[in-house]
Image (cartoon, rainbow, N blue to C red):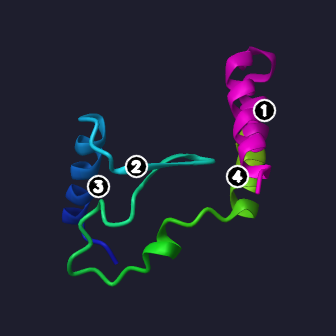
Amino acid sequence: FFSPGDNIRVLDWIIRRVNNEDVADVSPVGLLPKKGSINLDGLNVDWDKLISIPKDYWASDIDETLKWLDEQLGDDLPQDIRKEIQKQKDRLSQP
């Protein structure tokens, strides 16, 4: 398990990212840390599993999110958000 102090590892990555360091890879779900860009010293972590993108999970999550947004907002959900959700679904469906 991670301790609250481990959050600094991610915050360090975020700061480096916003300072335009080359620490991120583009993925179907957005920017993900490059291997080795987050300090994992002392942690027993399988990087590939940690950073994996199980398409079935993400597709299901997107569907659930859109369903919830439709139930909460209906036609008031901005079309730009619907378009971004569709773009994400399209990116996930590519090999």
The quarter of the picture where residue 56 lies is bottom right
Whole-percent x, y for residue 39 in the image: 23, 66
Return the residue at label 1: 71
Q: CA distance from mark 4 to mark 3?
A: 23 Å
Return the residue at label 3: 10
Q: Secondary structure at mark 3?
A: helix
Residue occupying image coordinates x 79% and y 39%? 67
Q: How many neighbours does mark 4 have within 10 angstroms: few (below 14), some (14-19), or many (20 or more)?
A: few
Amino acid type, callout 2: Ala
Return the residue at label 4: 61
Magenta run includes residue 80: yes
Residue occupying image coordinates x 73% and y 50%? 92
Please name which of the two marks, 3 or 1, marks the residue nearer to the observer: 3
Amino acid type, callout 4: Asp
Whole-percent x, y for residue 74 in the image: 79, 22
Q: Secondary structure at mark 2?
A: strand
Please name which of the two marks, 1 or 4, marks the residue nearer to the observer: 4
Range drawn in magenta: 66-95
Q: CA distance from mark 2 to mark 1?
A: 34 Å
Q: Which of marks 2 and 3 precedes in the sequence? A: 3
| Camera-nearest residue between 45 and 27 | 27
Q: CA distance from mark 1 to mark 4?
A: 15 Å
Amino acid type, callout 3: Val
**Do the residues bearing badges 4 and 2 touch, measured as CB atoms within 8 Å?**
no
The quarter of the picture where residue 18 lies is top left
**Do the residues bearing badges 4 and 3 touch, measured as CB atoms within 8 Å?**
no
Return the residue at label 2: 24
Amino acid type, callout 1: Glu
Quadrant of the frame with the N terminus: bottom left
Residue occupying image coordinates x 67% and y 65%? 54
Whole-percent x, y for residue 85 in the image: 71, 34
In screen coordinates, is 94 left or right of 22?
right
